[in-house]
Amino acid sequence: MEGIPKTGKTYHSLLWFLSKRGTGIIMVVILLILGIRSPKFFDPNNLMDVLKQGGILTMLALGLTLVLVPGGFDMGAGAAMQFTCNIAAALILSGVAPMLTVPVGIAAGLAVGLFNAFLVLVMRIPTFVGTLGTMFVLQGITQMINSGKVMNIGTRPFFTALGQGHVSIVPIIFIIVLIMMALIHLFLKYTQTGLRMFASGENPQATAIRGIVPGKYMLIGYVLSGAVIGFTGVVQCSYSYGSSPVIAGIDFLIQALVAAYLGTTFSKTGELSVVGSVICGLFIAALSSALIINGISNRQISGILGVILILSILVTVIHKREIGQVTIF
């Protein structure tokens, strides 16, 4: 690399290290600093609570990853999760067997995914605009379901164990996350469909030339993502013993986007990573817990997560610019 100033080499070396190796180190350092300031964070019970609290967020991030991989985007993911959560709570309160809400929630999520795919692929509406519209529609329907009131289902055997139960000291919801992570990772990395989803998302023009239809794999992404998000909403109902009238979907969406885009830094090629999404989702849950223990308000936490989202997308943009791809969504 003759002719490149030493300062330039240092800058590029530092940038490469931060984008490829530094994320995990920075996460650990941040949590160590916050934990040292407030040792309560390292209490085993609190750490198990972090795994439990991060479960919903991480599952939503996995759902988003499925639609981001083939080049899609979903502004309504958080609203869809809250929508299926309210459907589950309403069905249980009406006398439906709690565990039957699992297939119903998945089916509702699938329907939302198909609707998003229709808007994007058939109606040719930009992904951001189309799914933003879906978000508002789902928020309205959700408000109609709960009538602006909390729907408390109380403790239900087996069902509430999904979100609140433990195997020994390990939260069941964390075990569910690990199973989902393994299945989605294997699907995306070791099946022809998964590999083509990655290819169509990275370079749709090149894949189209080779006879691969990008729209087909974006459809698969929206459908699978919808199913995962629908199931996540049911687990959220279990975790929260019902549903809340508060529109919290946008908060979950921002955190899930942070996890998905920050997770790209755990991939050697800078691509979306299932494992990276899970690691970063749990980090966000741990960070939120550590900040609250250290006296930081929820409003400030939202601002911090917004900054992290901007920085994580910036790192992704820098990498994609290096390989000739600038568009994120």
Image (cartoon, grey):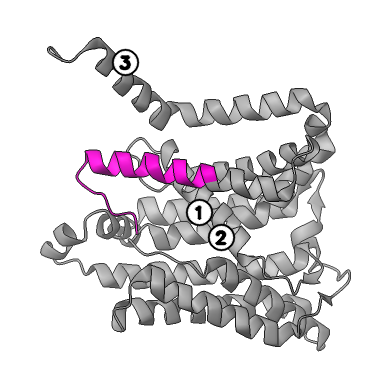
Q: Is residue 107 visible?
A: no
- Which residue is at 75% across, 60% downward? 163
Q: Amino acid at mark 2?
A: Leu
Name the element at disc 3: helix
Could you tell whether 11 is left or right of 39 in the image? left
Instruction: Indicate the secondary structure of the residue bearing disc 2.
Output: helix
Residue 86 or residue 97, whichever sits in front: 86
Q: Which residue is mark 1?
A: 257
Task: Identify the disc placed on residue 275.
Answer: none
How many angstroms separate mark 2 from mark 1 (CA)?
6 Å
Q: Give me the disc on residue 253.
A: 2
Residue 130: tell me if it is visible.
yes
Q: Quadrant of residue 180?
A: bottom right
> Disc 2 vs disc 1: Cβ atoms closer than 8 Å?
yes
Q: Where, quadrant-wise, is the N terminus in this rendering?
A: top left
Name above or below for residue 116 compared with residue 25: below
Tell me where the magenta segment starts and ends, as one range.
Answer: 307-329
Question: Residue 10's mark?
Answer: 3
